[in-house]
Image (spheres, grey):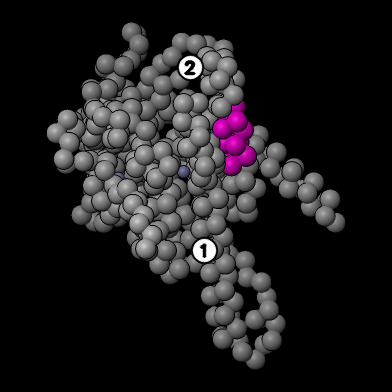
Amino acid sequence: MNKRRPPPSCRCTPKHNNKVRLLQGRGYAGTTNDTRKQIYAASSDEDHSLHHTLNTTNLLGSVGQLCSGFFHHEAATTATNTHRRTLCLDPIHCIRAPTTVVVVKVSSVASSTDFVARYHSCWRGYSNSIHAEQFLINDARLSSRLREEPNSTVDLYMTQQPCHYSTGRYMNRKVTGKTSCTERILKWWMKHQEDVGKSSSSSAASSSSSSSTAATTTTTTSTVLNVWLANVFRAYDTETTISNLSAKEANVFRERSNNSCEGLLQLLATRNVNVEMIDAKGWNFLFGLSMNTAAATAEGERKNMDDGDDPSINVQELILRRVTLSEGENKFLKQLKLKSSQTFNSNRKRKE
Ligand SMILES: [Zn+2]
Ligand SMILES: [Zn+2]
Ligand SMILES: [Zn+2]
């Protein structure tokens, strides 16, 4: 018999390790190499998918957790200006954890309540980790909601875009960068589109069985997938990053960052799929899923503002600042979109 070791299970919050500290409002931090800081506590697969119900008013947890997963911004204000400015909602409780968080919202005119859920990545070592997108794809409740509502809008709010053979660094280059959540998400999305197409053409056929044309009509759905990013991972402004790396690191980074771009191009070239930076409406939605936003914001602001900044800044102004900080990335995505449609058109011409 094949004596295989069982695949590693979730150890985001290992109970056996008393060196692991539970940090108030900060998620969990491991101090050994086999554990990682996590924004959300988890000890099983189920803990990585959380559905929003009327009773869950804080799907994204504290404001520190909201910041860790989405809002936190620490970058040069312009490509030529190296002055880094941090925009943080709660510097005391916000941790810089490598967790990827995805929030999905399915809405349609047919339903008065949106389907909302949160997923986050599970660290199981470099080659066995489960990415947030995998929990989303395997969520049976999400799948059935999508089947029930063929003409819906699906909004994904993500820490960063789905990976595309793009993770890892020089030291772990042999075991990283082997997976693509971009391909996983696209496969999942195409399958959903197909299912919807099938069910609407069969219902069209049954409702008008006398007409032979109905069954052969290819049904187009109006389902749209909007991918909203808090950050662009390794595809934007890469030369600035590369200039600070050693030659070895730079080689690996360049390869992974090219893959990252390729992944974005694949998403952008897909019909009814949009990729944009989170806009003000999206931020308001995410803030609404977190608790005590207003109170925590004020505290974070006082500690983070440059001298001369108005300490009485409110959430809407903060959101506006965050949107402004994403303008460069948004422009970059628009250029990629243009490029993807040009590539698509030239490929089509070649085939003709
Ligand atoms: Zn923060
Ligand atoms: Zn886990
Ligand atoms: Zn991934």
Is the CB of the residue bearing disc 2 within 8 angstroms of ligand 1?
A: no
Can I make out residue 150 in this image?
yes
Q: Measured from the top left, where is residue 207 in percent x and y?
A: 56, 85
Q: Is residue 81 left or right of residue 74?
A: right
- Residue plotted at (60% across, 87% down): 208
Can I make out residue 298 in this image?
no
Q: Residues within 10 Å of mark 1 (few under 14, many from 20)?
A: some
Q: Residues within 10 Å of mark 2 (few under 14, many from 20)?
A: some
- Residue plotted at (56% across, 32% down): 256
Q: Quadrant of ligand 2?
A: top left
What's the distance in space between the residues labelled 1 and 2, CA to CA? Answer: 40 Å
Q: Is residue 312 left or right of residue 176?
A: left
Res 76 label:
2
Residue receiving disc 1: 192
In this rendered view, identify the residue nearer to me: 230 or 284.
Answer: 230
Label 2 is placed on what type of residue? Ala
Relative vertical location of residue 46 with respect to residue 293 in this rendering, above or below: below
Q: Residue furthest top?
A: 307
Q: Magenta segment, which residues?
A: 254-264
Q: Measured from the top left, where is residue 331 in percent x and y?
A: 60, 31
Picture quadrant where residue 320 is located: top left
Q: Residue furthest bottom?
A: 210
Label 1 is placed on what type of residue? His
Sequence-first tag of 1 and 2: 2
Q: Is residue 69 left or right of residue 266?
A: left
Callout 2: SS? strand
- Which corner quadrant holds the C terminus? bottom right
Is 139 one of the magenta-colored residues? no
- Residue plotted at (58% across, 70% down): 197
In this rendered view, identify the residue nearer to me: 126 or 269.
Answer: 126
